[in-house]
Image (cartoon, rainbow, N blue to C red):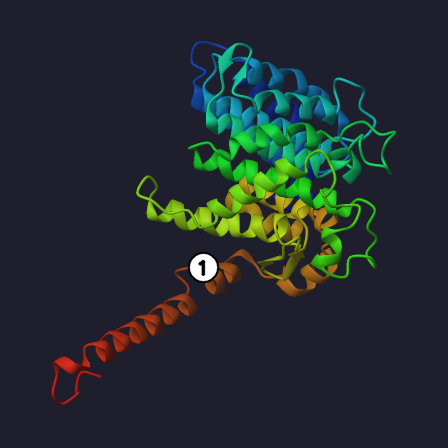
């Protein structure tokens, strides 16, 4: 895996060649550029952004126009447009700074996501999967904004001089997405609403003020008395329904996943309780207690796939984002081990793994024999 400062330096030294090759594929250069190749190029650039790290406005500027053209091209394959949108969002999230000019900054990507969330874009119907990805990207980039810019409203006394929060403008659309038959779109919309609700609760609340859910619900950060109160009540009811939804129109696995996901949403939206998730990796763990962090974590995990663990261990940018102490991790992971030692101790074919596998098989056999004990008279099968 490309991890650590050494690999970061290698990638930077070869970045111009890699960028040129990827952009050639993304732009459809030559008749042999297939959708699969264009998708792969976007995925490579997305992962490269995580490895290269923060404060690289030049990378953002190099990719902005090319990726936006792919996203706007309604004739491109949906998966390619999704990959390009996720890549663009990741590049802005990791590499971008506040020094970018208007039209090239994160706000321009947020506006693009908000347009793609609708049922139609540029006169063409938008697929549910692209709409769901646009909502995911919107959530990621909104997690970098102050709470008031996401959930502050012109009708709020404290924020009367501030324009309407971006999240409030999306609430009606998100409510309609929750009625969709597409499971992915419903989940993405639910996550967006939960993030907006969390930002709303945080308005005007200091750490010492948030004693319990009852007090949080009736303070300035709530929806009570606002013009969105009725809409949010409907959204809360819909999320509660989805958390217990049953029927034959969904597979057993999909129903189980949806119930689990929407129970987490309901805990925050209905009960005003913060989320809690612990991510364990070799050498340490990360505890996230806000939806902003969960959105960021899930987006990065989706990007890195099998490389997520090693990047969480070695990537300084991710350490800064999630508050990980990199020095402690380095001491705990025993990074001095050679590749051979790692293979002998951590591989699935190592002696330790084989021994654990045999032990598990014996335990499984014993449990099976205990269940079938009534079939034998003497019990010698145990």
Q: Is residue 61 above or below residue 257?
A: above
Q: Residue at x 52, y 9 (%)?
A: 123
Is there any visible trace of residue 294 in the rendered image? Answer: yes
Q: Find residue 143 and report its horizontal and vertical position in percent.
A: 70, 39
Q: Residue at x 39, y 45 (%)?
A: 254
Q: Find residue 96 and report its horizontal and vertical position in percent.
A: 75, 30
Q: Find residue 133 and report its horizontal and vertical position in percent.
A: 54, 31
- In front: 229, or 267? 229
Residue 118: which quarter of the image?
top right
Q: Find residue 315 and report its horizontal and vertical position in percent.
A: 67, 47
Is there any visible trace of residue 4 in the rendered image? Answer: no
Quarter placement of the N terminus: top right
Dot 1: within a 10 Å radius of its alpha carbon, few (fewer than 14), some, or many (20 or more) residues?
Answer: some
Q: Is residue 59 above or below residue 218?
A: above
Q: Residue at x 24, y 74 (%)?
A: 368
- Mark count: 1
SS for tag 1?
loop
Q: Is residue 155 above or below residue 32?
A: below
Q: Is residue 160 left or right of residue 125?
A: right
Q: Is residue 160 above or below residue 359?
A: above
Q: Residue at x 84, y 30 (%)?
A: 162
Q: Is residue 124 left or right of residue 98?
A: left
In the rendered image, the residue lying farthest to the bottom is 378
Residue 354: which quarter of the image?
bottom left
Quarter placement of the C terminus: bottom left
Q: Which residue is mark 1?
A: 347
- In front: 306, or 90? 90
């Amino acid at each position: 895996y490309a991890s650590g400062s050494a690999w970061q330096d290698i990638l930077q030294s070869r970045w111009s060649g890699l960028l040129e090759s990827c952009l050639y594929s993304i732009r459809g250069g030559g008749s042999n550029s297939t959708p699969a190749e264009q998708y792969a190029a976007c995925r490579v650039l997305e992962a490269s952004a995580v490895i290269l790290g923060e404060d690289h406005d030049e990378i953002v500027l190099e990719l902005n126009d090319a990726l936006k053209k792919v996203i706007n091209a309604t004739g491109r394959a949906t998966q390619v447009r999704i990959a390009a949108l996720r890549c663009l969002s990741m590049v802005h999230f990791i590499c971008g700074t506040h020094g970018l000019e208007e039209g090239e900054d994160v706000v321009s990507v947020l506006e693009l996501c908000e347009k793609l969330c609708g049922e139609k874009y540029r006169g063409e119907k938008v697929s549910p999967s692209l709409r769901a990805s646009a909502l995911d990207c919107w959530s990621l980039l909104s997690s970098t904004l102050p709470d008031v810019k996401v959930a502050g409203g012109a009708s709020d006394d404290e924020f009367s001089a501030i324009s309407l929060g971006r999240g409030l403008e999306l609430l009606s659309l998100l409510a309609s997405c929750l009625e969709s038959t597409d499971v992915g779109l419903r989940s993405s919309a639910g996550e967006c609403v939960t993030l907006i609700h969390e930002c709303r609760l945080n308005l005007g609340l200091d750490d010492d003020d948030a004693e319990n859910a009852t007090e949080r619900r009736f303070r300035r950060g709530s929806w009570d008395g606002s013009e969105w109160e009725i809409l949010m009540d409907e959204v809360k009811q819909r999320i509660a329904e989805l958390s217990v939804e049953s029927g034959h129109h969904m597979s057993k696995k999909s129903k189980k996943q949806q119930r689990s996901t929407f129970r987490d949403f309901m805990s925050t939206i209905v009960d005003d309780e913060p989320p809690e998730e612990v991510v364990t990796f070799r050498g340490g763990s990360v505890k996230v207690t806000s939806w902003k962090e969960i959105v960021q974590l899930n987006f990065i995990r989706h990007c890195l796939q099998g490389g997520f663990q090693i990047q969480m261990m070695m990537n300084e940018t991710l350490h800064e984002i999630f508050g990980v102490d990199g020095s402690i991790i380095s001491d705990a992971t025993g990074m001095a081990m050679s590749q051979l030692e790692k293979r002998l101790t951590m591989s699935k074919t190592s002696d330790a793994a084989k021994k654990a596998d045999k032990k598990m098989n014996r335990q499984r056999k014993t449990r099976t024999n205990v269940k079938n004990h009534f079939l034998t008279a003497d019990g010698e099968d145990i």
